[in-house]
Amino acid sequence: MATPSDKLAQSLAELKKLQDSGIIAIRTGELSRTHRERLLKNGFIQEVMKGWYIRARPDEPAGESTAWYASFWGFCANYLNSRFGDEWCLSPEQSISLHIGNNTVPRQLLVRSPKAGNKPTNLLHDTSILDLRLDIPENQDIQIIEGMRATNLYTALIACSPKHFTSKPIEMRAALSMIPDASDLLRKLLEGNHSTVAGRLTGAFRNIGCNKVADTIVDTMKSAGYTINEVDPFEDKPAFTFSKCETSPYVNRLRMMWESFREPIVANFPASPGKISDIDVYIKLIDELYVTDAYHSLSIEGYRVSEDLIERVRSGNWNPDSSEEDNEHKNALAARGYWQAFQAVKESIKRILDGENAGIVTDEDHGKWVRELFGASVAAGIIQPADLAGYRNRPVYIRKSRHTPPNYGAVRDLMSAFFELLQNEGNPAVRVVLGHFMFVYIHPYIDGNGRTGRFLMNIMLAAGGYSWTVIPVERRDEYMNALENVSVNQDIIPFTKFLASLVGK
């Protein structure tokens, strides 16, 4: 007779078949009632709405959103294909978000279809799909992104609302920067007799410094007999000049975010106290804070560490090959890695206080900090050395966050631009706030991004003459919510004020 474990294994085998076939939105009919109920009871699937499920993890706490946010785009693609076949596409505005690599999970996904019901479909964690009964572009104007049927970039720019330029200026400028020349856009403008749109897009391209594209649109439309009234749809000018219109949208977004965040940071963060005069005294003060810093930083990441464990690890009174309980063993390895990384960070700080550029030093040294964070785990055989070879080569998801870090293919370019911005930034407060935020926003590594981001923040604090600052685990929710608010809503002020409240304490 089959045991309960055997039966669960059989159900998991059926679930794996669906997973291997690329199915994320699991319909009732794709699993037998017995398998479905067994998997649901044991936490391996989760109901999204009546008749539809996603894979889940049994160890995820009740109400946890991570599995849903990680499954969102795949679920919506499967669900919409099931409802509408190939007769649907995303709204122009949502299409533009995907084109520029912004995969943040929207509260409401706007979809067009001639078969739509003009009503929302409620999903998990206060998200929904609103399908509108509207015509969709021809198939040649639809592009598959993240499994979603998106309007291609040229058609989306023509069809999107004029208000979108003012409500989402960073996204729209990033999208415009992807257009290398006016040829394909002009075909759409002429085919649709879009003289008003042509005037708006001409003004938009001129706003970001792509005058060649703007001039070509004007000259071609006029030669075809159209009168063009050039209008700038943005409310302001970008803070930096686009060097060329075909630059990576990821990098352009990063640069625009940096520039748009500078002023509110300067207004809400304490001014630099001045250069550190006694390096030895400063390093001694950092050493005195080590136990407190390690306890809080590791606790924020979910490790259960005590000051006693941290002290034992610091003194070398631990054994990575001991028969400790698994979780205690992992906690000890994390604490040892933090100690080793802390020593490397201090060496970076010494270089900076000796007069080296903080952006250059962090660019050169941050990989070492990450390797030290996980060095003990490599020695214990838990992590393979190849996992520390460089930036991530697969997607990552942040627990409970609607923000999906940029595609791994863009990470190298983003990190290069990030460190260039750090090197050239003259304001210490901006380096502190954006050094931390931008690092965790990019999420360049599979693991260790939060700890490394806090190290980077403290290095920038040292470069600006501020004291080493500990983010207390007791304020973890406030901290994570502030980071989420910047990532999703582009509002840097709460995060700036949060860090400012801690500096010097």
Image (cartoon, helix red, strand yellow):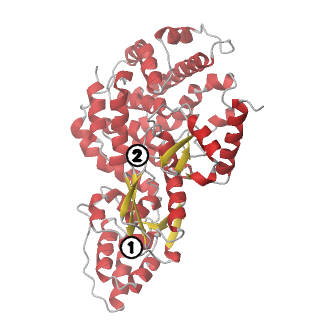
Q: Vertically, is 5 above or below 84?
A: above
Q: CA distance from mark 1 to mark 2?
A: 43 Å
How many numbered badges does the structure rendering display? Answer: 2
Query: Which residue is drawn at the image coordinates 38% and 34% (left, top)?
Result: 480
Q: Disc 1 marks which amino acid?
A: Leu
User: In the figure, 156 relative to 268: above or below?
Assistant: below
Can the viewer see residue 334? Answer: yes
**Label 2 Cα neighbours within 10 Å, binned few <14 / some 14-19 / many ≥20:** some
Tell me where residue 34 sits by quadrant: top right
Q: Quadrant of the C terminus?
A: top left
Q: Position of residue 428 (x, y in %)?
A: 32, 35
Q: Is residue 11 above or below residue 115?
A: above
Q: Is residue 223 above or below residue 428?
A: below
The residue at which mark 1 appears reads as 134
Instruction: Identify the mark nearer the N-term, 1 or 2.
Output: 1
Q: Which is nearer the eye, 384 or 266?
A: 384
Dot 2: element: helix
Residue 421, label in figure: 2
Residue 405 visible in rendering: no
In percent of the image, x 35 and y 60: which residue is there? 241
User: In terms of depth relative to the viewer, which is nearer, 190 or 104?
Assistant: 104
Residue 28, image x and y in percent? 57, 51
Residue at 62 percent across and 35 percent down: it is 388
Q: Nearer the viewer, mark 1 or mark 2?
A: 1
Q: Can you give x and y, in whole percent of width and height, for residue 235 in the image?
A: 23, 62
Mark 1, residues whose alpha carbon is within 10 Å: few (<14), some, or many (≥20)? some
Q: Check disc 1 and report its element: helix, strand or loop.
A: loop
Please name the amino acid that badge 2 sits on. Answer: Leu
**Rendered location of residue 395, percent (x, y):** 56, 46
